[in-house]
Amino acid sequence: MKKKTIALSLSIAVLLGIVVLWSIGESHRPAGANEFTGLIDGFDVSHDETRLLYRYAVNGQVGLYLAEQNGVGEQLLTESENERISSPVFSPNGTDVVYVSTIQQETGWNSSVVKLDTVSGERETVYESGELITRLSFGGDDSTVYALKAATFENYSPIAQERPHEFDIFAIPLDGSEMKQLTERLEYDMSDIAVSGTDEALYVTMFADEQEAETAEEMFEVKQSLFMMPLEAPGELTKIEPRYWDEELYGLAVSPDGQKLALTTITNADEGGTFQYELLLLDLATKEVEQVTNLKTYVMEPVFREKYLYFTEDRAFPSRAPDYHLHRYDLTTGELTEITVSVTSAIKEEG
């Protein structure tokens, strides 16, 4: 266990609050553990912006679906039985979908990386892990997917739920060749990852200032921050600090030209009451930020494409019964449009 980890975990538990404890707890419950019906977290958009990839539950049975960009033309790709399907991503070629399949075993949570051909329906497990993979991201080609992997799943303090810890970043070739470990940090938490389409840089949000904290007060001030790692220099992470912005940073996506990042953050931290999470654009050259949304709810999961910036909104936050909606933000006009997705079997159940 890393130095100061136990003390730091107490600070982080307070900092994160309900949102992280809820999301981690729900993300690693067994498939079908509740009877929820509706859209759930975990979606992506093809790089040509013609198709959506999303997770939808019908009475607790989670399926991975494809639809056209406007939400029409639902197609079931796969359903979970004894596995948890998470972090689905389109490959740059738009044909393959890659996702994490996680199964709870007596020894803990074991994850695999699965590639699914959306044309033929062929499904192939390209990497099997005895540990927990939480996030995937493609770079500029279809050969490699980048992953956040935890070495342990436990509670570091009596006030916290069991959750992933001791994270590092890995590159997983999809041809089945050996996985490459890019960092050796065993971080307390890494939450989101995005890789530039130019394959020049990898970005990650994580708690990584505990190494410099010497007192309990300093540990309490540790925040989830943004870091960059050049892919030509694995392991060398540099903190990126937006100008005039000092709140924690979540949900991460990089623009196709590699010049901007989309992130979500708390915008009412000093007001009290329920936290509101909105979407920001960060210019990597100037470090200036622009607030994109003002929905006063919980905005998450940005997906950055050429024409639009896509994201998920939970209108029921912080309820344990979420109400997810998909949106797209026009990067030219600033117009915000909701994308309606559904599943035929769910509509029949309601009827």
Image: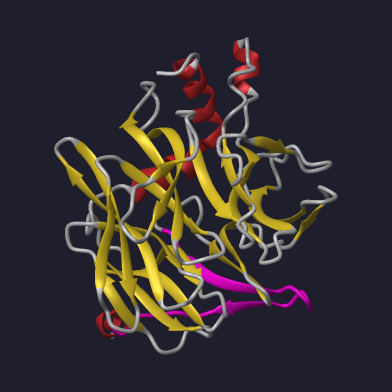
- Image quadrant holding the C terminus, namely bottom left
The part of the chain drawn in magenta is: 322-344
Q: Position of residue 20 (x, y in %)?
A: 47, 42
Residue 294, picture quadrant: bottom right
Is residue 81 found left or right of 340 in the rendered image? left
Q: Position of residue 212 (x, y in %)?
A: 64, 17
Q: Position of residue 271 (x, y in %)?
A: 72, 41
In the foreground, 227 or 26: 227
In the foreground, 87 or 220: 87
Residue at the (39%, 57%) spot, across then down: 321
In the foreground, 101 or 220: 101
- Image quadrant holding the N terminus, namely top left
Q: Position of residue 103 (x, y in %)?
A: 21, 50
Is residue 318 visible from the viewing direction of this image? yes
Would residue 139 be counted in the magenta stretch? no
Is residue 83 found left or right of 207 in the rendered image? left
Is residue 152 found left or right of 31 in the rendered image? right
Residue at the (23%, 51%) spot, across then down: 30
Would residue 324 be counted in the magenta stretch? yes
Residue at the (52%, 28%) spot, across then down: 12
Residue 216, picture quadrant: top right
Is residue 162 visible from the viewing direction of this image? no
32 w.r.t. 152: above or below: below
256 w.r.t. 178: above or below: below
Total residue callouts: 0
Residue at the extreme left: 106
350 w.r.t. 183: above or below: below
Residue at the extreme bottom: 73
Residue at the (34%, 61%) spot, across then down: 175
Rendered image coloring scheme = secondary structure
